[in-house]
Amino acid sequence: MASIKIPTPLRVYTGNNAQVTVSGETVGAALTDLTTQYPELKQHLFNGDQLRNFVNVYLGEEDIRFLSGLDTDIDSDTLLRIIPSIAGG
């Protein structure tokens, strides 16, 4: 099964798990499984059916926005990473 690495600020919504095993054949399906397991996380990742602008998901070193987005195919040994944008001033 694929895995998603959870950033520290969002771990409070995943029972402090740094990595969660998910099922699905696409990034979108994997994220849907993640938010099914941890429903409180959905509002922090999605705005409706779309990823929030400040949430970046990486497959290896590639931002999925430069691949096929949520329709990007994944394998059972895929490791996805959620990277929230951080602004400073």
Image (cartoon, rainbow, N blue to C red):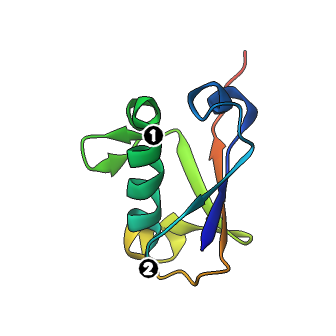
- The residue labelled by disc 1 is 45
**Location of the N terminus (image quadrant):** bottom right
- The residue labelled by disc 2 is 25
Q: Few, some or many C-alpha atoms within 10 Å of disc 1 (few <14, some 14-19, many ≥20)? A: many
Residue type at the position of mark 1: Leu
User: Residue lying furthest top in this view?
Assistant: 89
Q: Few, some or many C-alpha atoms within 10 Å of disc 2 (few <14, some 14-19, many ≥20)? A: some
Left or right of residue 86, residue 44 in this image = left
Which residue is pictured at 62% across the width and 39% down the height? 84
Q: Where residue 10 sits: x, y (%)?
A: 62, 31
Judged from the image, the secondary structure of the residue bearing numbered disc 1 is: helix
Which residue is pictured at 64% across the width and 31% down the height? 15
- Viewer-closest of 6 and 56: 6
Left or right of residue 81, residue 32 in this image = left
Q: Which label sits on residue 83?
A: none
Residue type at the position of mark 2: Glu
Q: Where residue 5 sits: x, y (%)?
A: 70, 52
